[in-house]
Amino acid sequence: MIGAAMRSRMPVGVAGIAMARPRRVDLSCDEGSGQGAIPPPRLTRSHELTELSPAREATLEARRRLVAQHPRLAEELAETTRAFEQQTTRLLLGPTAPIAASELQRVVKEVPAGTKVDVRSERAWPPTNLAGLQEVPVELTVAGSIRATVALLYQLGRTSRFLTATDVKLCVIAVGQPRERLTTLTVAGSLLPAAGGN
């Protein structure tokens, strides 16, 4: 009888299966345990946004400073472009290295005419790539005194083209003529490579 009475008090689900009462779980913890209650999602998101706010303000301020520098940077770019265009007029005429080498040889022949040196030989070397430019070298051998050779180098630096003198070598022509020197040097000019060229 007692067992029947207890079974009659238990809730019965589908097909006579006993249904257990749901239990309530307390997720909060005691203050003395060292752990607090789980924060709601909205409060966590608000806290994250608060932490990110200084970083976002710093990024925004950096962008504002960059925008404020735009007029100055544009002016500097325009000035640099004008200076570059002016300096490119001193490059050798192209558009190919052989044409530039012909012009360089012409300039090299004209310069010694105003100095007291005798051109013994000249030889063009293959062009080389240098910092986005093509460098066309010509090896020049001249005979004359040291003073005349210095005057030649000075005149090469005053031409309408950008010329550089490298590999300067001096030697005595004859023992009986110590003032006369045989000088070998490499004079090089530069040109802008043709569009699409290597």
Image (cartoon, rainbow, N blue to C red):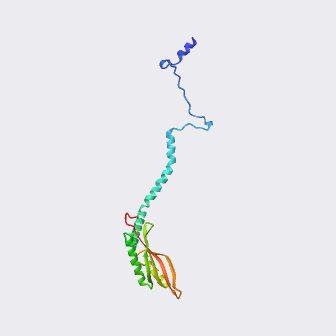
Q: Position of residue 11 (x, y in %)?
A: 51, 19
Q: Quadrant of the C terminus?
A: bottom left
Front residue of 83/94: it is 94
What residue do we see at 43% from left, 58% from top?
67
What residue do we see at 55% from left, 13% from top?
5
Q: From this viewpoint, is residue 1 visible?
A: yes
Label total for image: 0
In the image, is residue 48 above or below residue 159?
Answer: above
Front residue of 86/139: it is 139
What residue do we see at 50% from left, 48% from top?
52
Q: Position of residue 131 (x, y in %)?
A: 45, 66
Q: From this viewpoint, is residue 89 visible?
A: no
Q: Quadrant of residue 7?
A: top right
Q: Position of residue 192 (x, y in %)?
A: 40, 68
Q: Quadrant of residue 157?
A: bottom left
Q: Residue furthest top?
A: 1
Q: Quadrant of the N terminus?
A: top right
Image check: 32 left or right of 105? Answer: right
Front residue of 99/162: it is 99
Q: Residue furthest bottom?
A: 176
Q: Residue furthest right?
A: 32
What residue do we see at 43% from left, 63% from top?
73
